[in-house]
Amino acid sequence: MDAMKPIVGQWYRGVTNELFEVVAVDEGDETIEIQYFDGTVTEMDFDGWNQQLLDRMLDAADAPEDWSGAIDMEAAALDREFEDTARTNWSLPEDRSLRR
């Protein structure tokens, strides 16, 4: 069995081909908190982790390029254009007296 410790911030791919990230490891309780790409958070015990490794059902994976998985909006909405307002339009000399 290849020993692959769960690393916080590392992405993995499980047996169902779903991407998940390890978000916490509790050595005392021997649990691993994982968050799937869709935002679902769940917990796995060390024995479950090791069994998946033994059965070759768990692999390290690259982080997804599309970070919007857990965001509840259409991807097209993320590509909207923003109007860039020049600093001179919102910072007048008399506004400087309001700064500390």
Image (cartoon, helix red, strand yellow):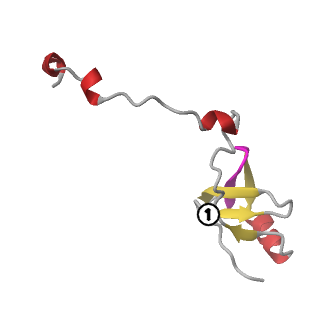
- Residue beneath the point at 45% across and 28% down: 83
In the image, 51: left or right of 89? right
Front-most of residues 78 and 51:
78
Give the amino acid type for the residue marked by disc 1 in the picture.
Gln
Residue 31 among magenta residues: yes
Residue 92, image x and y in percent? 19, 20
Res 32 visible: no
Residue 76 sits in quarter: top right
Residue 43, image x and y in percent? 73, 52
Residue 39 sits in quarter: top right
Location of the N terminus (image quadrant): bottom right
- Residue beneath the point at 77% across and 71% down: 50
In the image, 47: left or right of 97? right
Residue 49 sits in quarter: bottom right
Q: Which residue is mark 1?
A: 10
Q: Is residue 4 above or below residue 99?
A: below
Location of the C terminus (image quadrant): top left
Front-most of residues 8 and 51:
8
Residue 6 among magenta residues: no
Residue 64, image x and y in percent? 66, 57
Res 80 visible: yes
Q: Is residue 42 above or below residue 97?
A: below
Residue 74, image x and y in percent? 70, 35
Please state the extent of the stretch shown in magenta in the rendering.
Answer: 29-40
- Residue beneath the point at 86% across and 74% down: 55
Q: Secondary structure at mark 1?
A: loop
Q: Is residue 72 above or below residue 65?
A: above
